Image (cartoon, helix red, strand yellow):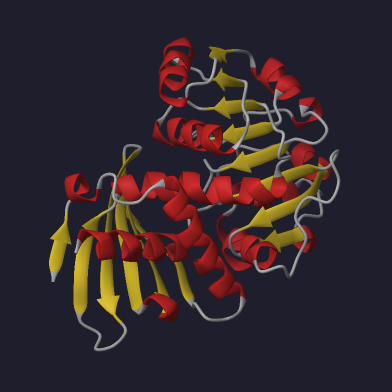
Amino acid sequence: MRHCTERELDGLVSLADAMAALREAFIARAEGRAPVQMRIPTELDGLRLNTMAAIIPALGVCGAKVYTALNAKFCFVVLLFSLDDGRLLATLEANGLTKLRTAAVSTLAAKHLARSDSASLAVFGTGTQAAGHAAALAAEFPLREILVVGRARAPEFAREVQAAAGVAAQAVTAQDALQRADIVVTATRSRTPVLDGRHLREGCCVLAIGSARPDAAEIDATTFQRASIVCVEDVGQARHEAGDLITAHAAGVPVWDRLTELGAILAGKAPGRTAPAEIMLFESLGFALEDIALAALAWSRAR
């Protein structure tokens, strides 16, 4: 058994590597070859302990991700086991892998939901995931501008993103960002909507990653009303955890019968974007399948 630190794992898996591994894992899931245990939270006095797991026979591994959430800070660990004999193969410190997998799955979804000529990206939020998404999407789309919307340090964050992604970036208002953006990323900790769906451009793609609790919603009901496709990692998990969807449903928007799983799109069982003017929405909650697939790849390279 080996313990892999953040330092050891840093740089072992590229964005392209991660997207390829995730594609294969989601296709396996869509074909019934990769069972997943949904997130199980345990809470006390503000501390949240979460566990989630997956079995991926094609990779010869199964594993669990365990992490704490306290005061908006997270600590992630993945336990990886052999399918051959059940032994523990490795423990991996997974903060870096979590940042990579979240941006990689959003970018993978965007390749099927966003227009290929998308040139303007709006990012709501100024944290680690916002930065990771800006860099990942800049690597895969012909972006000419990145528009930053944040309650704090937005101008400073825009300068950081510009330096990291090599794309002109600036802090703007939410309405300005939505009226200009081809791709919109929401990566905040807000429990109430941060965007007004009335201002979304035709043909845009919204990547919602900040809300993974049933009592929090970054996306308003209007966005769901306008979306042609609402894509999720797993329908069952979305019904249980997606505060954005739960809130829209409570507002009278018929969302549950419009959900499409990402794996179905990747496996060719469901369509992605079919017309330039469609508004697409990807609701990402974080899925154990992603964590175990990337942990297996990182561990194989660390060996």
Residue that lies at the very extreme toward the bottom in this rendered image: 85
Which residue is rendered at x = 52% and y = 35% of the image?
A: 139
Horizontal arrangement in the rendering, residue 116 relative to residue 95 (left or right)? right
Which residue is rendered at x = 75% and y = 21% of the image?
A: 179
In which quadrant is the N terminus drawn? bottom left
Tell me: residue 110, above or below residue 192: below
Q: In the depicted view, which residue is nearer to us: 144 or 226?
A: 144
Say if residue 215 shows up in the picture: no
Q: In the depicted view, which residue is nearer to us: 166 or 227?
A: 166
Relative image position of residue 32 (x, y in whole percent): 58, 81
Relative image position of residue 191 (x, y in whole percent): 55, 36
Q: In the depicted view, which residue is nearer to us: 61 or 64?
A: 61
Tell me: residue 16, above or below residue 127: below
Res 301 → quadrant: bottom left
Relative image position of residue 171 (x, y in whole percent): 55, 13
Horizontal arrangement in the rendering, residue 139 relative to residue 197 (left or right)? left
